[in-house]
Image (cartoon, helix red, strand yellow):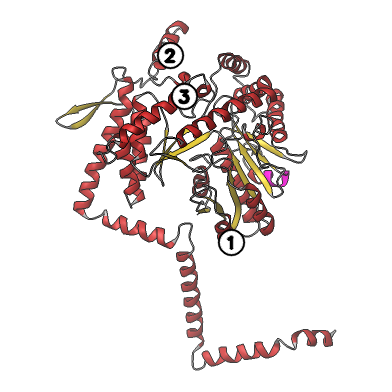
Amino acid sequence: MAALVKTITGPVMPVLDSIKDQLNALCKGLQPWQIVVYTAGTTLVVVFTKQFLFQEESLKERGKKEFFRLIKKIPYVKAKIDAEMAKTTKSMVESLYKDHAGHGYVCQIPMKGYSEKELILELEKYQALAKTDWKKGRVSGTVYSGEEKLTQLMAKTYSMFAWTNPLHPDVFPDIRKMEAEVVRMCCTIFNGGPETCGTVTQGGTESIMLACLAYRNLARERGIKVPEIVAPITVHAAFDKAASYFHMTIKHIAIDPVTGKVNVKAMRRAISSRTCVIVGSGPGFPHGIIDPIQEIAALGKRYNIPVHVDCCLGGFLLPFMNKAGFELDPFDFRVDGVTSISADTHKYGYAPKGSSVIMYSEKSYRKFQFFVQPNWTGGIYASPTIAGSRSGAIIAACWATMMYIGEQGYVDATRKIITTARKISKGMKEIKGIFVFGDPQVSVVGIGSDDFNIFNLSDALAKKGWNLNPLQFPSSIHICVTLPICQDGVAEEFIADVKAITADILKNPNAKDGGMAAIYGMAQSIPDRSMVKDIACSFVEGWYNTTVPTVSNGDMNGSVH
């Protein structure tokens, strides 16, 4: 045994002796207290340097933020910014209020409750505040079906299960069964075997965040303190939200400028020892481009990293495209390496808002999204998703919707959606002055221009009643095709309007920008993104405003009705 140890340690001992001699020479002439102080001091410096350099935000981003923070402390600059922010906030509050000017706000419950008749009258007044008529098919995304019979079915189902809560499966076994069946039906749609699993969530953002949470927890179990998400720059903002909420970092990977798909080689270079999940979109929200899922999954397999496919937007289109007559490469659990998929039942699944599904290839991933507090004085607390109590009625309505539409119904709807989207894409490509981003295969068509500010087109379309989605980096707009847009003549009318407006804009492409063109142009040009964030926060604050804006000597006052 001693001979074996000598054989193993023999080659190493001279190296260790050399290191020992160098350390002794370094400490020669030093008193013991000096050695302790120098060692502790050096350790502290190394730890501080590591913590300073390796944080959730890069050193460059933190340096830029600190620079702008100091600039904004200069009295003159601060005064100018505060004045502009006040003006912008006032304008946003007024714009939100104009849709219901004269109605005021209810700020306390009535002393005596309304009768049903009175309440219905009030509800109809509120409903009348909405001026955009999505039923005519002039709204991008937002409402994906609107079929009257389906609406009535949802309402009836909701009333049957209005008081249910899946947090109590012993009290509501009906909801537990329906949720399990919704998950299993979705796993089957995405070609998952019996080992696939998941949960119903309250929307796509929660589905994405739960996947990120699961992979963060898995990574922490493996010793990674600040796990990292590697995702395309075009991936949904919910991944940034997950990184912000769950103490993670996110690396955004550039896309191919021609195809709009993520650059897989750049994605491979971005992978590090801290990477906990690689993401691909099917399709991406901005321009409707499907990332190369098979190549991304191969990266995951190669480096033993989970791969998430975000199908929140296309989740109930992509699985039915082949049967609807549109060839599509595998993107789901058929692809070796795909470990999770998010899909919104409340988009092209046509279920009511507030329902989505997160699916995993196996239960060993799903358990990392669960929360359990075994030591609570109120008992052992366990919940599968972010919320504790949830609406069982939404789950029941989702189940009823899927059962009502059926596979053939989804195939037929997919055929309508894809046919219409490709008609619009073809029409856009034939219009001089604008272009379509990449080769959109699903329901979203992204539109840009090299000749004029594309937001001028959006503003002009808005005046004709169209409601499209503005995008940035690069400046663009998109139309997300829904069943209302598939009505006879709507696509043709949209193409004709875009063609006529574009021709008019090209007569003077450098005309002064106004409306959205000015706002988005300004927002993209501001180098201090924290200012854009502040403006956006002011807008969100305005959602909850319950004061009626009035003007007196240029100042906004508030009166409560």
The numbered mark, 2 or 3, whose residue comes first in the sequence reads 2
- The magenta stretch is 362-367
Q: Is residue 239 above or below residue 28?
A: above
Q: Is residue 302 magenta?
A: no
The answer to whether residue 162 of the structure is visible from this angle is yes
**Which quarter of the image is occupied by the N terminus?**
bottom right
Question: In the image, which is nearer the foreground, mark 1 or mark 3?
Answer: 3
* Residue type, mark 2 in image: Leu
Q: CA distance from mark 1 to mark 3?
A: 49 Å
Q: Is 306 on the left or on the right of 438, as rendered?
A: right
Q: Which residue is mark 2?
A: 123
For mark 3, does the 10 Å Cα neighbourhood hold few (<14), some (14 to 19), or many (20 or more) residues?
Answer: few
Q: Which residue is mark 1?
A: 272
Q: Is residue 128 above or below residue 394?
A: above
* Residue type, mark 1 in image: Ser
Q: Which residue is mark 3?
A: 492
The numbered mark, 1 or 2, whose residue comes first in the sequence reads 2
Task: Kindly check if marks 1 and 2 are in contact, taking CB atoms under 8 A apart as contact.
Answer: no
Q: CA distance from mark 2 to mark 3?
A: 35 Å
Residue 338 is marked as none
Q: Is 449 on the left or on the right of 380, as rendered?
A: left
Identify the element where label 3 is drawn: helix
The numbered mark, 1 or 3, whose residue comes first in the sequence reads 1
* Residue type, mark 3 in image: Glu
